[in-house]
Amino acid sequence: MSKFWVVFKREYAQVVKKKSFLFGIFFMPLFMAGIMLLPAMLADTKASTTEKLAVIDQSEVGVGEGFKESLKRYTLNDSETPYYEVVEVFELSGADSARFTEIEDSLRQTIIDRELKYFLVVKPGAHLCDTCLYLVTNSDNIRSMNRFEYRLSDILSSVRLGISNVNIGVDSVLSLTRRINLPTRDAKGQSLPFLIKYMGALVFVMLMFGMILGYGQMVMRSVLEEKNSRIMEVLVSSVTPFQLMLGKIMGLGAATFTQAAIWVILGAGIYMGRGTFNIDSSIDRLVFNPAIIVFFVLFLVSGYLLYSTIFALIGSIVASEKEAQNFVFPVTMSLILPVMIGIYIIQEPNSTVSLILSMIPFFTPTMMSMRVVFLAPTLESYSVFSGIIAQAIIGFIIVVLTIVGMVWLTSKIFRIGILMYGKRPTLPEIVKWVRY
Amino acid sequence: MFLKLDRIRKEFNGKVAVDDLSLEVPRGVIYGIIGPNGAGKTTTIRMIMNITIPDSGSITLEGARVGKGFTNRVGYLPEERGLYKKMTLQEIMIYLAELKGMAASESSKKLDYWLERIGLMEYKNKKVEELSKGMQQKLQFVTTILHDPDILILDEIFSGLDPLNIELIKDIIMEMKRAEKTILFSTHVMEQAEKLCDHLCMISGGKKVIDGTLTDVKSQFGKNSIQIDIEGDGGFISSLPGVKKMTEFNNYIELHIEDGTDTNGLLKAIADKVLIRRFDIVEPSLYDIFIDMAKIDPLELEREGEVANV
């Protein structure tokens, strides 16, 4: 058996045998799912009970009753229980300020006592003045606020139209002045909703970031452990430094992909349990898009190889993990940067700046994956000759060439650096090693 | 010749570490490379191990340049040595033997013998970090020989070892010599070299000072040394006729005398002034030869159990 495989086998076994490996397999997806689903779940829990409110209506044109009527369309999840219950509409004349103050004060108390969630105040002439309308509440529920604003806008529009002798009902106003959501379509066919692409790109990039950084640093720690425990010289008397370095990178890389493969199998299992491929499901269209999947895998592998080589280099020239942190920081930054400027890439995936950034080898794995998610051809009109596929292939080739260069450079430095105990070499010394 | 170093040279940042050094190591001998710290011993050994590449010169084993096939035939214990702390004894022994090309099935059969021999059998499935320092040293040594190497290269093997372990390792080294293995070791402690080596090479400042068999080296210098043990102040002795050099140690004085000096006359001259407890005409020690040949400050050399006092 080649010595490379002996090293490979040990590095692989050292990771896979650890309890933390098993823990990571199950904990990571739960953690990711938690981060994404928890806010939505928390927001949804509020919808399980009916929200109570009251209205003080001094408009004398029935805004309060109209509002009460318009809220009937909203129901809770079971679609039978109303979402809102308007307990009372106090219709007062605009002049009756004493009675108004009395009612308002008592309603305020009911809100403090949590008997009511909101009360709406409609002052005289509310259809003419924007400040003549307000909501009193102790909680800001964005969903309800949006609904109230929409409904009141419609009611007041209809009041205004009535005054202008255009006498139509609220429902007519609604249908005549309805807002639209502008869907986007690819020139060649149906595209994915923005939100799905955004979430997809985010999940891919975060996964890539986590795995490259986590396992790449493991390569560095492994080199440092061998330096610090002084077993290094024994090792390099049996294997060449190049075999050792490659065995380490590949062995730990194989552990990474074991983890990823288990996730894919688990995911596929869950997916199969749910149903079969559905061309109309956005998530299915994202996950089963060949370009997206193929490039995600290619860039995950090449990104890992590129960064783990850099981490091996760092491990070979520093004496301790503490010292290594100075070098790790810029490397981490070059991985985080694409995530930070990702919002720009997402908005302008096809711009020249996005293209150039995604062709810088250290950014390519993350940035190009994001762009592929946004620009990949749709399933209906698949063409391997689309621009983004050509760009991704070029990007991949650049990364591969960079890896070859980095491996060459690192093997030169690694060979000498690993036997330097305690003393960190200066830059001119490192340059000299490369020239040997 | 079994292992041959031909005019090897190595510089680090313009400083010559090894200067045109040539060595010939016959098969089946215990060969000592001796010299003070910084003499170039470790650099020489690293060049033999192909870890450091010489600037010039060649190193051959049985006429072929050392390289790929060589590493599997060698057991190497560097001066800076350690083990993976988190692996069990069994795992690390198998792993290191596997790196030397020995299949796991074979090494797992042999490792019991060696664990028994060094008294660590009960730790077979324990992690290395559970061993004491002395135990780890023994383990390091047996991981070096588990794959049954033809050549054993040991860099400062005895430094930091406790006396019991030194005896154990010496016994194993002698066994290996009897089994026709070649053992090359370096030390800066002359007494160890004197007790173990058949052949030796002294180096100083990267240059060879002298080499040959232990008997050859010693006979070149003749019996021109006297060890005396006296009561009282022996300061006058250095000025007695025939005395070339006097070295005082804690428990005795060593005298180098000119060839043909009347030793009886010298004995009388000393006995006149102080009480003599011992008067020994001896072969020169490696230590003396080395100091004489290399013209170095004796303080750079260590004597086992004694402090040089010049």
Image (cartoon, coloured by chain):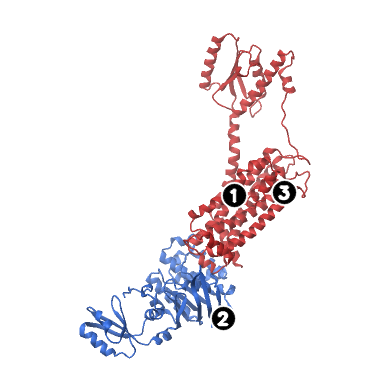
Q: What is the spatial separation of the Cα atoms under label 1 and label 2, in whole angstroms?
A: 52 Å
What amino acid type should be assigned to the residue bearing mark 2? Glu
Q: Secondary structure at mark 3?
A: helix
Residue B149 visible (yes or no): no
* Residue at mark 2: B62
Rendering coords of residue A369 (x, y %): 67, 48
- Subunit bearing disc 2: B
Depth check, mark 1 against mark 2: the one in front is 1
Q: Give the position of the C terminus of chain A as an image quadrant.
A: bottom right
Q: Secondary structure at mark 1?
A: helix
- Subunit bearing disc 3: A
Q: Quadrant of residue B304?
A: bottom left
Q: In the figure, B244 relative to B140: above or below?
A: below
| Residue beneath the point at 75% across and 38% down | A185
In terms of sequence position, does the residue under pointer 3 or pointer 1 come before the other?
Answer: 3
- Identify the chain drawn in blue: B
What amino acid type should be assigned to the residue bearing mark 1? Ser
Rendering coords of residue B42 (x, y %): 47, 71
Are both tags, 1 and 2, on one chain?
Answer: no
Mark 3 is surrounded, within 10 Å at the Cα level, by few (under 14), some (14 to 19) or many (20 or more) other residues, namely many
* Residue at mark 1: A334
Residue A69 visible (yes or no): yes
Are both tags, 3 and 2, on one chain?
Answer: no
- Identify the chain drawn in red: A
What amino acid type should be assigned to the residue bearing mark 3? Ala
* Residue at mark 3: A291
Rendering coords of residue A176 (x, y %): 75, 22
Mark 2 is surrounded, within 10 Å at the Cα level, by few (under 14), some (14 to 19) or many (20 or more) other residues, namely few
